[in-house]
Image (tube, helix red, strand yellow):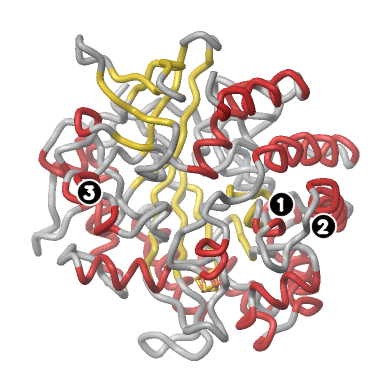
């Protein structure tokens, strides 16, 4: 038996309360997966929805290092089911790593499977090409480029500013490849719009709205790099907010509007709210003070950790605590050379952060760190964080939520193993299935059914 299989099975045995689906999902997210040519897409002209590169590369190699996967994109996500571990339906975002012990390939009958150390461990489903990706804007741009959808069609991901004004080693977050991703797509001759035109966004949404007849798309996220000065004459709140305003005017209440932006002063946060945003993600990135200062030098210099946290708490006055959902990058706190050297210390630190926010009714969420090779932390830690850290974090997250009587945050689709669609960490797969989910906690609250796209 290969060592990775042994590692996974050992953790499943030691942490029986963590769904086994989540163990595989975390391992795939932290370490990536290889793709046999038989499992790649035919880009936008095929039957499989391709990886859109919606903000960061989320790959373990640069495009030139990915071989055929750089020419024929892998699917945006995969779904795992069945196999010897009897996995329930699990949606996993695709992070390509040609050297991974996980491999997706078709068998002799053309059925896709996930292989670990050479053994088939799950059936693999891929997202069908959504009808709305088959149509282009009047200027020829693709919907995938302007308004890609992820999380099995649940979330429209609008990275409207595809670079960051924190630039270079002294400002960029040490785990972030947004600026590199911009450069590599340009170098490969791929379409990659730096600042998206609001009219183009509306046109792409119009196409999604027209062809998404099952109403699988439920939320949109407006995001992009930090704005420390201005873009197109607007500061950060006005820049991201004016897209929300235009969307809400054209499609009132059609989707749950979310914005991922810096922790801004209360007046700016109020502008987001006034523009129609319902959920605010002022990400705290990493809890430990020293690591925040080292990993987020731009944010530390321009705002500072204490002020950043104060602003997160203040934004609950505007949005309501339920609708303030700060993200952190799970795993970077164990990155060499500065990170914690034991899982115990890393979990203790992050739990302290969870308790800080949850004691104020704010429910953070996390994405699983992908150590992209062009980032300082990714270069120094190509293996990412230990899998045990990720599994214990799922336990700690759920336990802390229980302590404070909180349930899964709104805007993420249904929780629970076999039901979750959130694809870049398994926190939703690890929460109870009967949890109230997907309600925006104010008088605009509503619940929506989510159907898998194309299903
Ligand atoms: S603020 Fe940091 S994490 Fe966000 S885009 Fe800029 S460099 Fe990346």
Left/right of residue 291 with respect to residue 154 in the rendered view: right
The mark found on residue 351 in the picture is none
Q: Closest to the observer: 305 or 212?
A: 305
- Residue at the location (68% across, 67% down)? 337
Say whether mark 3 is within 8 Å of ligand 1: no
Q: Tell me, yes or no, if residue 433 can be seen here.
A: no
User: In the figure, 29 relative to 201: above or below?
Assistant: above
Q: Secondary structure at mark 1?
A: loop
Q: Circle 2 sits on which residue?
A: 353
- Residue at the location (62% across, 29% down)? 23
Q: Marks 2/3: CA distance?
A: 40 Å
User: In the figure, 47 relative to 30: above or below?
Assistant: above
Q: Circle 1 sits on which residue?
A: 364
- Residue at the location (73% across, 56% down)? 320
List x then y, in percent, for residue 123: 39, 16
Which of pointers 2 and 1 indicates the residue nearer the eye?
2
Q: Circle 3 sits on which residue?
A: 67
Q: Quadrant of residue 433?
A: top right
Q: Secondary structure at mark 2?
A: helix
List x then y, in percent, for residue 307: 78, 79
Q: Quadrant of residue 414?
A: top right
List x then y, in percent, for residue 2: 53, 24
Label 2: few (<14), some (14–19) or many (≥20) C-alpha neighbours in 10 Å: some
Left/right of residue 279 with respect to residue 431 in the rendered view: left
């Amino acid at each position: 038996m290969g060592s990775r299989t042994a590692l996974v099975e050992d953790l499943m045995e030691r942490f029986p309360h963590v769904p086994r689906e989540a163990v595989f999902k975390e391992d795939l997210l932290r370490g990536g997966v290889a793709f046999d040519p038989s499992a790649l897409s035919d880009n936008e002209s095929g039957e499989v929805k391709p990886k859109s590169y919606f903000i960061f590369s989320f790959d373990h190699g640069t495009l030139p290092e990915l071989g055929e996967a750089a020419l024929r994109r892998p699917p945006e996500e995969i779904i795992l089911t069945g196999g010897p571990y009897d996995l329930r339906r699990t949606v996993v975002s695709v992070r390509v790593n040609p050297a991974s012990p996980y491999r997706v390939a078709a068998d002799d009958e053309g059925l896709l499977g996930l292989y670990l150390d050479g053994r088939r461990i799950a059936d693999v489903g891929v997202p069908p090409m959504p009808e709305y990706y088959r149509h282009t804007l009047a200027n020829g741009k693709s919907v995938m480029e302007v308004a890609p959808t992820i999380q099995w069609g649940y979330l429209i991901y609008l990275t409207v500013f595809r670079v960051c004004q924190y630039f270079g080693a002294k400002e960029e977050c040490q785990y972030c490849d947004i600026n590199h991703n911009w450069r590599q797509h340009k170098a490969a001759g791929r379409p990659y719009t730096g600042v998206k035109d609001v009219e183009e966004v509306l046109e792409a949404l119009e196409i999604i709205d027209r062809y998404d007849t099952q109403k699988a798309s439920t939320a949109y996220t407006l995001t992009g790099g930090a704005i420390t000065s201005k873009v197109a004459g607007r500061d950060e709140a006005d820049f991201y907010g004016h897209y929300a305003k235009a969307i809400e005017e054209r499609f009132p209440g059609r989707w749950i509007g979310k914005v991922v932006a810096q922790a801004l002063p209360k007046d700016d946060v109020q502008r987001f709210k006034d523009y129609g945003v319902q959920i605010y993600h002022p990400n705290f990135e990493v809890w430990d003070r020293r690591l925040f200062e080292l990993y987020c030098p731009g944010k530390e210099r321009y705002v500072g950790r204490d002020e950043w946290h104060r602003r997160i708490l203040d934004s609950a006055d505007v949005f309501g605590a339920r609708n303030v959902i700060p993200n952190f990058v799970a795993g970077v706190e164990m990155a060499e050379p500065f990170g914690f050297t034991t899982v115990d210390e890393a979990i203790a630190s992050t739990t302290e952060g969870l308790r800080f926010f949850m004691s104020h009714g704010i429910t953070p969420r996390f994405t699983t760190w992908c150590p992209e090779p062009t980032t300082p932390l990714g270069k120094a830690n190509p293996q990412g964080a230990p899998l045990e850290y990720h599994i214990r974090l799922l336990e700690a997250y759920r336990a802390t939520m229980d302590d404070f009587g909180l349930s899964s945050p709104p805007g993420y689709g249904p929780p629970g193993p076999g039901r979750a669609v959130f694809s870049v960490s398994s926190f939703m797969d690890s929460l109870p299935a009967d949890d109230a989910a997907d309600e925006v906690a104010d008088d605009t609250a509503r619940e929506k059914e989510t159907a898998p796209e194309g299903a």
